[in-house]
Image (tube, rainbow, N blue to C red):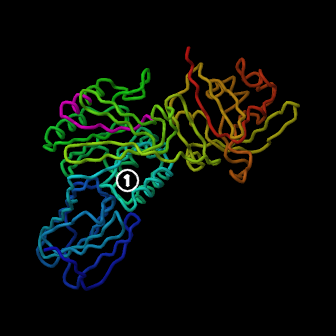
């Protein structure tokens, strides 16, 4: 029978993954550390006598095995991303259970047994609901709104279908992790294409574990599969087929980031490997999957194909790609399961609020909103430069710091010769640039130098520098003259329209967009 107890003896306090863990050690002899195996959760941190886990299921098992029989084996486990008021820990040994918050508990065990199993389950309900959302991409406002909505009437759990971050940097993961912790229900995740950029996939796995896993709850089976590289690898497709085939649950759901097809006529913002996409659809349809949930396309859409519903929920913060009538609104999906019946309803969220210290990078298919911290985390150039105005006077003399425009636009895709780069300021001013401005050849490099987005001037960073963020040209001689501007402006652009190098140095930059050549 399970009961709570407090052991006598010394208490050792340590910090595990941001959580205070107090491990009680009794006065009788203590064994060496046990061998630990875990299923249904990702190991955040493992010490000799303590463990920190993030749940990836509502069913978790922990096995502790000691190689010695003398004395007592003592161990402390902290589990996050659970419904602390609904999940039931069970064991053949006595457990001390402490609820840390709505989604975290701490369990202490001290036993004379040589092996202990600890099991977590959430009692099934014949009627329950869960949430689905995706593509917050570093904007935590929608996640915070979801956190407020679920307070007082919590669903069973939620799924984030990927693109938690703009481009997979550690500070971006820390921000979204904190936002997810504020949601008072478990949130299960999968990686998106933005999350794995710039080695972000390694950080994702460190924090959230694998993007491919499954679990059961009530009469439902839930499977999550990784498509962060615009495809699903063959071994993961094999796993998914076996996993779905083995499940006897009458209702099955699959979650991924990139959808296998784009439901919009003439659009192809979906998996790039059509063989993989077709096989994924064959697997889910063969195994009678009720619904496949994905993100990636920044809208809401629900389409039925061969008896399986495919739902796209890419609207929890990222820039939208459709008008409201065609699903272009910020939202999450409330999925209700009642016996064998399933309904999925999009719930509208507030649109993101404009922030002068954030900038939008976009093309026809993708968009990112970046913070100053995001921009500062990219490789930087710091050089002296200046420009001529339309009167021929020299202005802007100083040292500018920032990433190249090339590095910024590569976060959303490539720019091709013939494409136009449009930079707009918060006051409505704009300038168009060519491929050669962004990727200058040797002759243009001598005249223009690198084209950067400067966020710092003479060591002063925005908002204290009140002209940033700003486009800056960094020629080797530190002087971007009107003649240089004329020689590095394509027909119909720049100094061919208005003879001022300074006009190319757009201030208060709000958005940078690659407009693709339709020719």
Does dot 1 land on a helix, a strand or a loop? helix
Pinpoint residue 427: horizontal percent, then vertical percent. Answer: 72, 39
Where does the C terminus fall, quadrant-wise?
top right
Q: Which residue, given by chain and number where applicable, does mark 1 sit on?
A: 207
Q: Is residue 114 left or right of residue 510?
A: left
Q: Residue at x 87, y 35 (%)?
A: 393
Q: Looking at the rendering, which quadrant does residue 84 occupy?
A: bottom left
Pinpoint residue 282: horizontal percent, then vertical percent. Answer: 23, 28
Q: Looking at the rendering, which quadrant does residue 9 occupy?
A: bottom left
Pinpoint residue 330: horizontal percent, then vertical percent. Answer: 48, 42
Q: Residue at x 49, y 44 (%)?
A: 317
Q: Residue at x 57, y 42 (%)?
A: 379
Q: Looking at the rendering, which quadrant does residue 275 occupy?
A: top left
Please tell me which residue lies in front, 139 or 291: 291
- The span shown in magenta is 281-297
Task: Categorize mark 1 by other alpha carbons within 10 Å: few (<14), some (14-19), many (20+).
Answer: some
**Residue 511 in magenta stretch:** no
Q: Is residue 398 left or right of residue 118?
A: right
């Amino acid at each position: 029978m399970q009961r709570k107890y407090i052991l006598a003896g010394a208490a050792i306090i340590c910090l595990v993954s941001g959580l205070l863990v107090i491990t009680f050690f009794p006065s009788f002899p203590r064994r060496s550390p046990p061998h630990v195996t875990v299923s249904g959760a990702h190991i955040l941190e493992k010490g000799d006598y303590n463990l920190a886990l993030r749940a990836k299921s509502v069913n978790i098992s922990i096995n502790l095995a000691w190689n010695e029989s003398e004395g007592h084996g003592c161990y402390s486990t902290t589990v996050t991303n659970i419904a602390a008021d609904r999940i039931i820990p069970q064991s053949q040994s006595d457990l001390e259970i402490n609820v840390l918050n709505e989604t975290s508990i701490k369990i202490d065990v001290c036993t004379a047994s040589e092996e202990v199993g600890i099991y977590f389950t959430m009692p099934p309900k014949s009627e329950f609901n869960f949430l689905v959302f995706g593509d917050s991409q570093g904007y935590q406002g929608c996640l915070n709104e979801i956190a407020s909505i679920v307070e007082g009437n919590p669903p069973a759990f939620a799924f984030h279908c990927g693109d938690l971050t703009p481009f997979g940097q550690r500070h971006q993961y820390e921000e979204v992790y904190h936002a997810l912790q504020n949601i008072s229900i478990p949130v299960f995740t999968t990686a998106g294409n933005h999350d794995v950029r710039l080695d972000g996939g390694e950080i994702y796995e460190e924090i959230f574990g694998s993007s491919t896993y499954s679990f059961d709850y009530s009469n439902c089976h839930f499977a999550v599969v990784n498509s962060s590289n615009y495809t699903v690898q063959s071994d993961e497709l094999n796993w998914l087929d076996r996993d779905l085939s083995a499940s006897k649950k009458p209702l099955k759901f699959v979650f991924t980031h990139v959808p296998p097809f784009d439901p919009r006529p003439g659009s192809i913002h979906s998996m790039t490997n059509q063989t993989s996409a077709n096989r994924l659809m064959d697997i889910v349809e063969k195994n009678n999957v009720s619904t496949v949930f994905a993100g990636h396309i920044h809208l809401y859409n629900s389409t039925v194909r061969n008896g399986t519903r495919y739902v796209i929920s890419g609207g929890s913060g990222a820039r939208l790609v459709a008008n409201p009538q065609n699903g272009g609104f910020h939202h999450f999906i409330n999925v209700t399961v009642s016996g064998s019946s399933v309904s999925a309803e999009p719930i509208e969220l507030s649109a993101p609020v404009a922030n002068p210290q954030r900038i939008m990078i976009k093309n026809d298919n993708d968009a990112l909103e970046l913070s100053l911290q995001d921009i500062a985390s990219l490789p930087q150039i710091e050089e002296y430069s200046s420009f001529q105005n339309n009167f021929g006077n020299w202005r802007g003399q100083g040292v500018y710091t920032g990433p190249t425009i090339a590095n910024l636009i590569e976060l959303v895709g490539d720019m091709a010769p013939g494409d136009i780069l449009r930079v707009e300021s918060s006051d409505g001013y704009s300038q168009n640039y060519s491929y050669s401005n962004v990727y200058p050849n040797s002759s243009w490099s001598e005249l223009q130098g690198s084209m950067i987005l400067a966020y710092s001037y003479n060591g002063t960073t925005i908002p204290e520098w009140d002209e940033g963020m700003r486009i800056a040209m960094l020629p080797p001689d530190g002087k971007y003259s009107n003649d240089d501007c004329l020689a590095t402006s394509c027909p119909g652009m720049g100094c061919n329209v208005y003879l001022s190098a300074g006009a190319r140095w757009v201030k208060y930059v709000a958005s940078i967009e690659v407009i693709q050549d339709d020719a």
